[in-house]
Image (cartoon, rainbow, N blue to C red):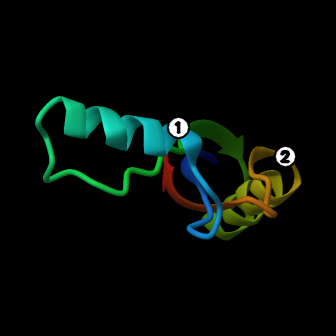
Amino acid sequence: MNFLAEINVMPLKEILDPQGKAVTGSMKNLGLTEISNIRIGKRITLEVEAPDEDTARQKVDEACKKLLANLIMESYDFEIKAI
């Protein structure tokens, strides 16, 4: 079976997010003062071939821990669906 994984990687809340701070400042300059505390991360999609959803989930989790997310500075979550 083939599965599609959609992964969100975000900086930990305790870590300074310079890109998010810059965009937050720009929102104020654009008159959008209601918008604050912007955090910018990354979205990754990938396909995985596995016999079942649990195995696919384990493989995606392993990929996130080993390569796709820096667990010292980032957190991640993902969704999987059959394709």
Badge 1 local density, few (<14 within 10 Å), some, or many (20+)? few
Q: CA distance from mark 1 to mark 2?
A: 22 Å
Answer with left or right where residue 1 lies relative to residue 63: left
Q: Nearer the viewer, residue 35 or 5?
A: 35
For label 1, the residue is 19
* Badge 2 element: helix
Residue placed under numbered mark 2 in the picture: 67
Q: Quadrant of residue 70?
A: bottom right
Above or below, 53 against 33 in this view is below
Which amino acid type is shown beneath numbered disc 2?
Leu
Label 2 CA crowd tier, 10 Å (few <14, some 14–19, many 20+): few
In the picture, residue 41 is in which quadrant?
top right
Give the image location of residue 26, x and y in percent: 30, 32
Give 7 or 46, whichever is nearer the viewer: 7
| Closer to us: 82 or 76 | 76
Q: Relative to 73, does residue 83 appear above or below in the rendering?
A: above
Residue 78 in the image, given as x and y percentages of width and height: 55, 59
x and y percentages locating residue 9 in the rendered image: 60, 51
**Image: 32 above or below 26:** below
> Is 25 on the left-hand or right-hand side of 69?
left
